[in-house]
């Protein structure tokens, strides 16, 4: 391993200052994506800025009609949060489904959405609930945040501090898991909050997480699995790899969406 400087700030301001003074530095949250690429020399940051001791970045709380999750909140802590389980159980199911116990007890929501892995679970929840990503500089709507595979609207020097999720009347997540990693080959998050109907898909799109507008339009008449029975989406633009073809992933989108709707309306 090559040499780099390791920092452990205790405030967001300190972390932002370190980033400003070290343009080649990387933020360290759970480390599940960053550390492997460092070991492979695919990333060689001059410094690591560990956010684990930064005050105010962890926890789950209700604020009005929203649930706010700190960026450094571990998946296991979010999944086991009484507030989340009571007010938005469909969202609690997302971190509960991530990887394995080791990943759930180390990985964070902020790291997941900042990395925007095309198979990650949290991006679907953010887009599927119309979340707001809060940084040290601004608030970004989920619809504007995810810009492509491993790409987001975050600018240099921005640090995710919180994610605010509106409390939906009905919401659920369903995914077809990779048997080894637990990643979503296809994951679908559905929600209904007043007239706002959302269907968000992760794991399937060649450009990352996306919404299925045709399903959303059909569900405006009736928020139920039967409303999209027989509906499909085109395989064009779907991921293709050794695990699943574009056609299979397109098929799974419909299957997972109907299962999520059945769960949300049970």
Image (cartoon, helix red, strand yellow):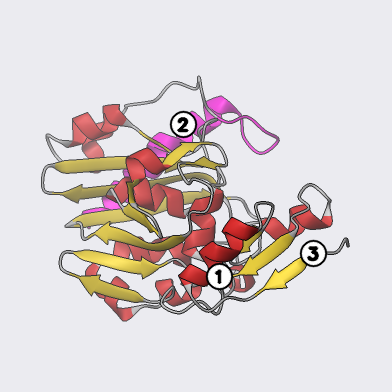
Q: Position of residue 252 (x, y in %)?
A: 47, 37
**Residue 134 sits above or below residue 145 on the image:** below
Q: Quadrant of residue 127?
A: top left
The residue nearer to you, when weighing 240 against 229, is: 240
Q: Residue furthest right?
A: 1
Q: Is residue 160 left or right of residue 129?
A: right
What is the crowding at mark 3: few (fewer than 14 residues within 10 Å), some, or many (at least 20)?
Answer: few
Question: Which mark, by number, is residue 104?
Answer: 1
Separation of marks 2 and 1 at Cα, in angstroms: 29 Å
Helix, strand or loop under label 1: helix
> Where does the N terminus fall, quadrant-wise?
bottom right
Residue at mark 3 = 4
Q: Earlier in the sequence, mark 3 or mark 1?
A: 3
**Residue 59 sits above or below residue 125 on the image:** below
Q: Is residue 103 covered in magenta?
A: no
Q: Is residue 247 covered in magenta?
A: yes
Q: Position of residue 169 (x, y in %)?
A: 16, 57
Helix, strand or loop under label 2: helix
Residue at screen point 31% across, 53% down: 132
Disc 2 to disc 1: CB gap under 8 Å: no
Question: Which mark, by number, is residue 251?
Answer: 2
Q: Position of residue 158 (x, y in %)?
A: 48, 54
Q: Give the mark toward the camera: 3 or 1.
A: 3
Separation of marks 3 and 1 at Cα, in angstroms: 27 Å
Query: Magenta residues?
Result: 239-266
Residue at screen point 85% across, 64% down: 3
User: Looking at the magenta stretch, what is its main secondary structure?
Assistant: helix
What is the crowding at mark 1: few (fewer than 14 residues within 10 Å), some, or many (at least 20)?
Answer: many
Q: Earlier in the sequence, mark 2 or mark 1?
A: 1
> Where does the C terminus fall, quadrant-wise?
bottom left
Helix, strand or loop under label 3: loop
């Amino acid at each position: 391993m090559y040499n780099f400087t390791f920092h452990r700030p205790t405030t967001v301001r300190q972390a932002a200052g370190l980033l400003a003074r070290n343009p080649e530095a990387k933020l360290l949250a759970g480390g599940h994506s960053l550390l492997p690429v460092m070991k492979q020399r695919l990333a060689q940051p001059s410094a690591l800025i560990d956010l684990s001791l930064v005050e105010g970045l962890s926890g789950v709380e209700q604020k009005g009609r929203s649930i706010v999750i700190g960026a450094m909140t571990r998946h296991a802590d979010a999944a086991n949060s009484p507030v989340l389980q009571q007010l938005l159980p469909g969202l609690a199911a997302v971190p509960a489904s991530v990887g394995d116990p080791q990943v759930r007890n180390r990985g964070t929501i902020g790291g997941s959405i900042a990395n925007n892995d095309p198979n990650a679970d949290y991006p679907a929840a953010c887009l599927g609930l119309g979340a707001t990503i809060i940084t040290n500089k601004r608030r970004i709507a989920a619809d504007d945040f995810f810009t492509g595979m491993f790409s987001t609207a975050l600018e240099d020097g921005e640090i995710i501090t919180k994610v605010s999720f509106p409390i939906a009347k009905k919401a659920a997540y369903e995914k077809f898991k990779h048997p080894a990693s637990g990643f979503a080959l296809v994951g679908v998050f559905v929600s209904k909050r007043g007239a706002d109907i959302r269907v968000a898909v992760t794991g399937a799109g060649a450009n990352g997480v996306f919404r299925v507008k045709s399903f959303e339009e059909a569900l405006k008449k009736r928020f139920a699995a039967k409303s999209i029975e027989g509906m499909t989406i085109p395989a064009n633009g779907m991921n293709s790899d050794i695990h699943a073809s574009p056609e299979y992933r397109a098929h799974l989108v419909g299957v997972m969406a109907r299962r999520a709707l059945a769960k949300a309306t049970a």
